[in-house]
Amino acid sequence: MTPKICLVAALALCAAAPASAQALPESLPLPPQWEKEISAAALKFSGQPCAGEYSVDRAAGRFSSAQFAEAAASAKAFTQDLQAFLPGARVRFETDSDHLTRFALLDTVLPLFSQQERRADGVYTLNCSLAPASRRP
């Protein structure tokens, strides 16, 4: 398991609602359409294109808005802690606290993007590693 995948797994576990501990995320096959969606979301959110290492995980079950909001708050706290341990890295985080949470780790040797979406059949986590930002002279 690469460091990027370990970090993404930590984010997914951190964001899992306490009531859904039995429903740990499972990896899903990556259809080409999802790769395109992840790429578009990552570029729009982070300004950097995906460079590979795509993955999709799903925590099965019906999650309420309150459960998702609680998970989003936990994920936000985790990203703030992460920023403290990675000086010089830039962390972007946004959530609507209902259906969508986005996270990007930028300006580091392991740039990555992760998006969690609450859907009718579970919470999906879409991930990719990002291309390093181009250095300006």
Image (cartoon, rainbow, N blue to C red):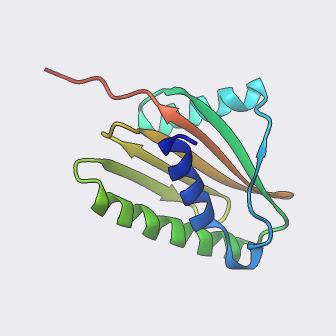
Task: Tell me if residue 104 can be seen.
Answer: yes
Q: Position of residue 110 (x, y in %)?
A: 40, 39
Q: Quadrant of the C terminus?
A: top left
Residue at the image point whose x is 32% and y is 58% from the top: 83
Q: Residue 116, percent across and down?
A: 64, 53
Q: Residue at x 22, y 48 (%)?
A: 88
Where is residue 8 shown, x and y percent of the image? 55, 50
Residue 7, image x, y percentages: 50, 51
Asked whether, in this view, residue 110 is left or right of residue 96, the answer is: left
Residue name at image x 19 percent, y 23 percent: 136
**Residue 5 figure quarter:** top right
Question: In this rendering, is residue 29 above or below 57?
Answer: above
From this view, report whether residue 16 is shown above or below residue 5.
Answer: below
Image quarter (top left, top right, bottom left or bottom right) of the N terminus:
top right
Of residue 44 and residue 84, the one placed in the foreground of this image is 84
Residue 97 appears anywhere in the view? no
Residue farthest along the front direction in this orientation: 1
Residue beneath the point at 85% across and 58% down: 120
